[in-house]
Amino acid sequence: MQHRVYSYVDRGFYSLQIRRFWELFGREQVLVLLSEELKSSPQATLAKVHRFLGVKEIAPPQALVRHALNYDTPMTPQERNRLNPLFESDISELERMLDIDLTSWRSPA
């Protein structure tokens, strides 16, 4: 096993990771959520998880609501401009795979 502390870019190619989960578990057993959903609607997102699992809905802990995606430092314009072209094809593949619009992921700095 390879241990790479700063492998953020490698881990950003989500389509490969999702395909692997689908191969191992089947599509019907994998729920894919966007972090944006968790940040904008933590309770609705948790309810979606409950429905997917077939369990009784419970209120999310306040720590989830407060902590959802509070990064210490935002991405700089230079970082975004460097990463956008790198991830373009993976974003397009995710849109096809998940039938969702990820235009916001392509936004310029």
Image (cartoon, grey):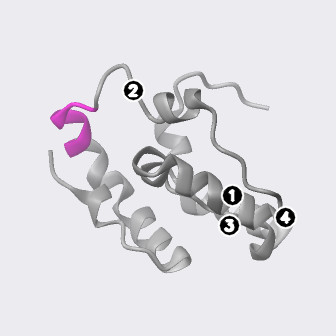
**Does dot 4 land on a helix, a strand or a loop?**
helix
Find residue 99 and report its horizontal and vertical position in percent. Answer: 49, 80
**Does dot 1 land on a helix, a strand or a loop?**
helix
In primary-sequence order, the first of circles 1 and 4 is 4
Rendering quarter of residue 51: bottom right
Rendering quarter of residue 89: bottom left
In primary-sequence order, the first of circles 2 and 3 is 3
Q: Mark 4 = which residue?
A: 24
What stretch of residues is rendered in magenta? 75-81
Q: Quote the CA–CA distance across marks 1 and 4.
A: 20 Å
Tell me what residue is drawn at x 31 percent, y 22 percent. Answer: 73
Rendering quarter of residue 31: bottom right
Quadrant of the snapshot with the N terminus: top right
Q: Quote the CA–CA distance across marks 3 and 1.
A: 20 Å
The crowd level at tag 2 (other Cα within 10 Å; few <14, some 14-19, many 20+) is: few
Left/right placement of residue 29 relative to residue 5 reads right
Q: Quote the CA–CA distance across marks 2 and 4.
A: 31 Å
Give the foreground label among 3 and 1: 1
Q: What main secondary structure does the magenta stretch of the protein show?
A: helix
In primary-sequence order, the first of circles 3 and 1 is 3
- Residue type at tag 3: Arg
In primary-sequence order, the first of circles 1 and 2 is 1
In primary-sequence order, the first of circles 2 and 4 is 4
Q: Mark 2 = which residue?
A: 71
